[in-house]
Image: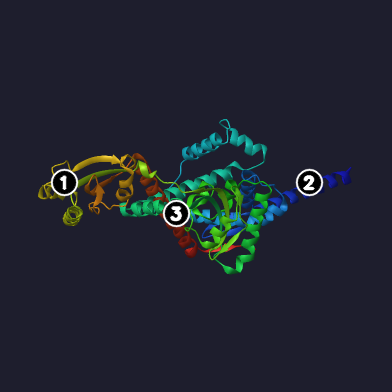
Amino acid sequence: MRCACLRFVFLLCGLAACGVAQAQQAGRIVAVVNDDIITRYDLIARLGIALSSSNVRDTPEVRRRLGSQILRTLMDERLQSQEAERLGIGVSEHEIARQIADIEKRNNLQPGGLDRFFRSNRLDIEALKEHLRVEAAWSKVLARRIAPRVEVGADEVEARLAERRAAVGSSEYVVSEIFLAMNDPAREAEVRAVADGIVAQLRAGASFEGLARQFSQSSSAAIGGNLGRVRAGQLDSRLEAALDSLVPNGFSMPVRLENGFYILLLRERRVIEGLAAEEAEFALKRLHFRAPDGAAPAQVEALREQAAAVGGQVAGCADMERAAGDAGIEEPVDIGRIKLGDLPERLQQEVAGLDPDVASSPMPWEGGFLVLMVCERIATPDDARERAEIARQLRIERVNRRADRYLQDLRRTALIFRRK
């Protein structure tokens, strides 16, 4: 009886020792970011969420290949959280609950469904909440420190609009990205292995958006890596070459640039379309120089020279009435607002190419000559929407670039220790 009791005691001690060892292993520190620690449990919990949300098969090999990238993401999040705390920025439980409700809605889950999903799949809902808390806090940091300093001028919008209209007929891509940063060249093999692992998971059917959210180190990660529309010539030539080799919904192999590796998803390739030329609207004025009936060729030529001289001296639309009076023209000068397509076909090309307040060359018209002037290119509702969208894109691009630099600065000044 005594031997049996001793064996039972030894068994309990063995189980207790095993439990302690497992707890110690889970609590083992894998990285220190300034004064904050990241434990092995933090890494395992977050990796489980990343694999589940990305539709990645959970195997020891996958965990080994992708774990280092999750650890780098956790280290960046520690930096972001510390910066938010330094600035006195917090996130309430109500805000976290609202984010979880949004996730449930996007995934067609009933209220409380996300918590049930996590429990049934042995995932840590608190690890997700911490990720959401850091994401929201960092957004507030950017809203306070960067967004107010970002200005987009009307001239910048017009320049981008002019570029876009000049590009009508050329190609553009709708692209998503996964970016893996490489600040230390000694880590190239490690980062490439992670990139190769992500491509392997994409081939196995993993969600590109899910992988981008969990593994990408670009500011686009928060929106699933979506870069939106990218015009041909805007990207690095190596990235564009990768896109050109893809079919829609195809993804690239890792592309090595100086700052890291990019994996691209070509969601769509299309031709840039602009407002149909005939729909463009103009405010026009005209001078109509009429030749007398039966005018000799010399008289017609003299009239053309007069029209050219008068047109060359007109100082903008406001001066057209004066010029008409001096030339003895009694016909109405102001044509008003007109669509290009409503003009006679032979005038359309001339008007479309005119700069505002610059008189055209004399154009033969009804036995005489017309001098036309564009007083205004009238913005249509489509123009207004396009300008607003361009301004929004420019603002997002600028905020994202500054956010990336902000995080790089935090990395450079931090004390980071990572266990092998």
3D distance between C-alphas at marks 2 and 1: 119 Å
Locate residue 87 relative to residue 63 in the image: left or right: left
Q: Badge 1, how many Cα within 10 Å: few under 14, some, many 20+?
A: few
Q: Where is residue 384 in the image (x, y as percent from the top left)?
A: 34, 43
> Looking at the image, can residue 355 be seen?
yes
Q: Where is residue 31 in the image (x, y as percent from the top left)?
A: 59, 59
The quadrant of the image that shows the C terminus is bottom right
3D distance between C-alphas at marks 3 and 1: 66 Å
- Figure coloring: rainbow
Amino acid type, label 2? Leu
Label disc, if present, on residue 292 of the rendered structure: 1
Element class at badge 3: helix
Please name the residue that numbered disc 3 is placed on: 400
**Mark closer to the observer (2, 1):** 1
Query: Where is residue 183, by image quadrant?
Result: bottom right
Q: Position of residue 393 (x, y in %)?
A: 41, 49
> Looking at the image, can residue 87 be seen?
no
Question: Of label 2 and label 3, which has the lower sequence position?
Answer: 2
Label disc, if present, on residue 12 of the rendered structure: 2
Amino acid type, label 3? Asn
